[in-house]
């Protein structure tokens, strides 16, 4: 019986992969040097929060969007809602401490900058993402109508 051949890629790809592993190992050592238990607890907690709370929530929201679009021919339009919603959610997740105002004093002391405006900026970026997605959908529908006529 023959063993399956595993493609290794070019030497440049292997070097790049080895460098990325070295960088990840260095970051891991630096991250875990001070408070390894707190970091491990945060990672496990984040994984559990995502898998047990967030995943069911956005699966239900996605199902509602797909059902709201109705016909099977219009289900491909769900991507025009999914992508901006996912990007907006990712931005909210990354910047939540500043958007919620929970680390205002700490941010000001650490950077010397004012944390004001983060909620408004996040809302503007979200509006721009959904607006751009709506514009792309409108252009696509216009193109489909022109080719059909």
Image: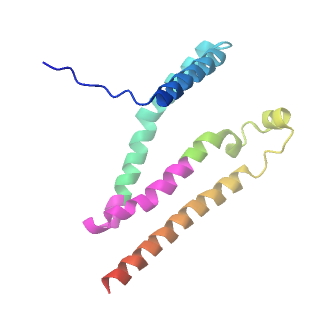
Quadrant of the drawing holding the C terminus = bottom left
Q: Nearer the viewer, residue 141 or 45?
A: 141
Image location of residue 21, percent across then percent down: 53, 22
Q: Position of residue 142 (x, y in %)?
A: 42, 79
Say if residue 124 shows up in the picture. Answer: yes
Residue 82: x %, y % from top left: 44, 55
Q: Residue at x 48, y 32 (%)?
A: 49
* The magenta stretch spans residue 71: yes
Q: Does residue 56 lie above or below 29 as drawn?
A: below
Picture quadrant where residue 127 is located? bottom right
Q: Position of residue 115 (x, y in %)?
A: 78, 45
The furthest residue to the front = 11
Q: Is residue 76 above or below residue 45?
A: below
- At x 55%, y 19%, the residue is 41
Residue at 79%, 33% (x, y): give it.
106
Main secondary structure found in the magenta portion = helix
Q: Is residue 71 visible?
A: no
In the rendered structure, which segment of residues is drawn in magenta?
Answer: 66-89
In this rendering, would 60 be left or right of 32?
A: left
Where's the N terminus, which quadrant?
top left
Against 91, residue 10 (above or below) is above
Which color scheme does this rendered protein use?
rainbow
Q: Look at 76% across and 52% down and name the residue there.
A: 117
Is 71 left, or right, of 44 in this rendering?
left
Is 30 placed left or right of 64 in the picture? Answer: right
């Amino acid at each position: 019986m023959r063993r399956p051949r595993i493609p290794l890629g070019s030497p440049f790809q292997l070097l790049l992969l080895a460098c990325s592993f070295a960088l990840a190992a260095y970051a891991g050592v630096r991250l875990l040097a001070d408070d390894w238990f707190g970091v491990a607890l945060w990672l496990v907690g984040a994984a559990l929060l995502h898998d047990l709370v967030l995943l069911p929530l956005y699966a239900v929201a996605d199902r509602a969007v797909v059902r709201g679009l109705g016909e099977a021919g219009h289900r491909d339009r769900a991507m025009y809602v999914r992508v901006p919603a996912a990007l907006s959610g990712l931005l909210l997740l990354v910047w939540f401490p500043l958007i919620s105002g929970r680390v205002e004093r700490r941010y000001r002391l650490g950077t010397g900058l004012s944390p004001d405006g983060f909620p408004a900026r996040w809302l503007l970026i979200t509006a721009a993402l959904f607006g751009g997605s709506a514009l792309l959908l409108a252009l696509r529908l216009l193109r489909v109508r022109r080719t059909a006529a």
